Amino acid sequence: TVDHPTTMDGSEPPMNEAQDYALRFEDLTVDDDLPLIDRIVRYCRSGIALQRLVHVKMLAETAETVGTKDSITTLIPLLSTLVEDQESVIRQHLASQILPLSLVCMVRNVGHGQKYKVSEMLEDRTLPKLYDAEGYHVVTTSVVGYLQTLVMDADVDVRRSASDSLAGLAFHVRSDDVARCILPIPLRLAQQQGIKNAQKKQKPEEQEGLTEELRITAANLLAELGGAAENGSIPTQLVREVILPAVLALCKDPGFRVRRAAAQALPRVLGGTTAEDAYNKILPAFEALSRDEIYRVRKSTGECLVDMSRSMMILASKDPNPRAVNALRRSSLIP
């Protein structure tokens, strides 16, 4: 017997003529004689979801093989339609491919025949980078825009994958460009309120749920970016003046799930600030959350105590008066 073709969600497509089935069966066959990059272009644009999925998952390895120039001119243009793909699983895998693809586009000394492999640069963020001017511009403008679209996706797995890529990208662009091209995205998400920006087709409660989910995504992203200041990947001043105020605002969010996410973000942000910020802002906010009316928020602060202690120790190692910081850690966290 011959199985009827199905969509990604398992439903059968409309019944058509026998000739249509033959065409669809033929379309399922991948032309392996095509050059690699031509094959990726053809099947990432395929009308068959399975073909698109398989070849989207090959974007990063293809970029590493073909190099910077072809990745910029041929692979990047595919993203504009793929970020709007009707299949969420394709958007999810696309989001995970964007970071390694971006590295090949903007860094000349990574990829096939170059000094470093993509995997090596992803693992060791301190490796020296020789930026390609055109690729760097494309990544920090167009590609970041695609990540913003995916970070605001209705599907939680797509948002999570895009957030990971966006946070990872912050370690590989110039530190001065984090504030310009990456940080505005979680800051906008943190301000998502009400239902006016949601899709009109959604019910009001679904719209409100999505905006709350976006604020949770913002808290997680801000935590990752704040943590990047611990090793100097982004300036401490940026954390103190921009990231910390945004996280503190989320600590007072009306949604308890947002407050819980903000509580989990505080230890990450703490390591990139100062002892003064810890004493005057972060520890009071953390204590307030530990007394929150919702048990799950209070429970979250308890689970974060070890991370808070670790971040305070990092502060102590950088502070001119480490004894005072350690004393503050013991007096504020142990009780």
Image (tube, rainbow, N blue to C red):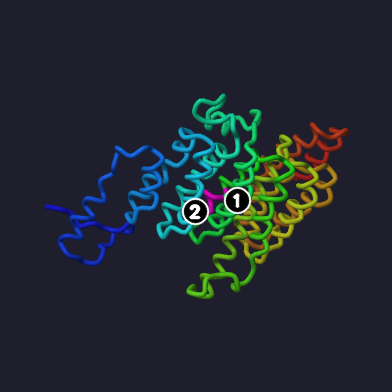
Disc 2 on helix, strand or loop? helix
Quadrant hosting residue 292:
bottom right
Q: Nearer the viewer, residue 276 or 68?
A: 68
**Could you tell me how far apart the alpha carbons at marks 2 and 1 are, in whole angstroms?**
15 Å
Please determine whether, in this image, residue 126 is positioned above or below residue 21. Answer: above
Q: Residue at x 56, y 46 (%)?
A: 164
Q: Position of residue 284 (x, y in %)?
A: 79, 53
User: Which numbered marker is on residue 99?
Assistant: none
Q: How many numbered badges does the structure rendering display?
A: 2
Which residue corresponds to mark 2? Answer: 158
Q: Position of residue 29 (x, y in %)?
A: 25, 46
**Residue pointed to by mark 1:** 144
Name the one closer to the observer, 114 or 38. Answer: 38
Secondary structure type for disc 1: helix
Give the extent of the magenta segment: 157-163
Query: Three-letter amino acid code at disc 1?
Result: Val
Q: Can the viewer see residue 309? A: no
Pinpoint residue 162: horizontal percent, then vertical percent. Answer: 54, 50
Mark 2 or mark 1, whichever is nearer to me: 1
Amino acid tagged 2 = Val
In the picture, residue 213 is in which quadrant?
A: bottom right
Give yes or no for residue 180 being in the magenta stretch.
no
- For the point 74% across and 43% down, the residue is 176
> Picture coordinates of residue 182 (x, y %)?
66, 50
Identified at 56% across, 42% down, the residue is: 102
Disc 1 crowd, CA 10 A, few/some/many (<14, 14-19, 20+): many
Quadrant, the C terminus: top right
Q: Give the mark nearest the N terminus, 2 or 1.
A: 1
Residue 158 belongs to magenta span: yes
Determine crowd level at label 2: few under 14, some 14-19, many 20+ residues with C-alpha closer than 10 A: many
In this rendering, position of residue 26 left or right of residue 62: left
The answer to whether one can see residue 198 in this image is yes
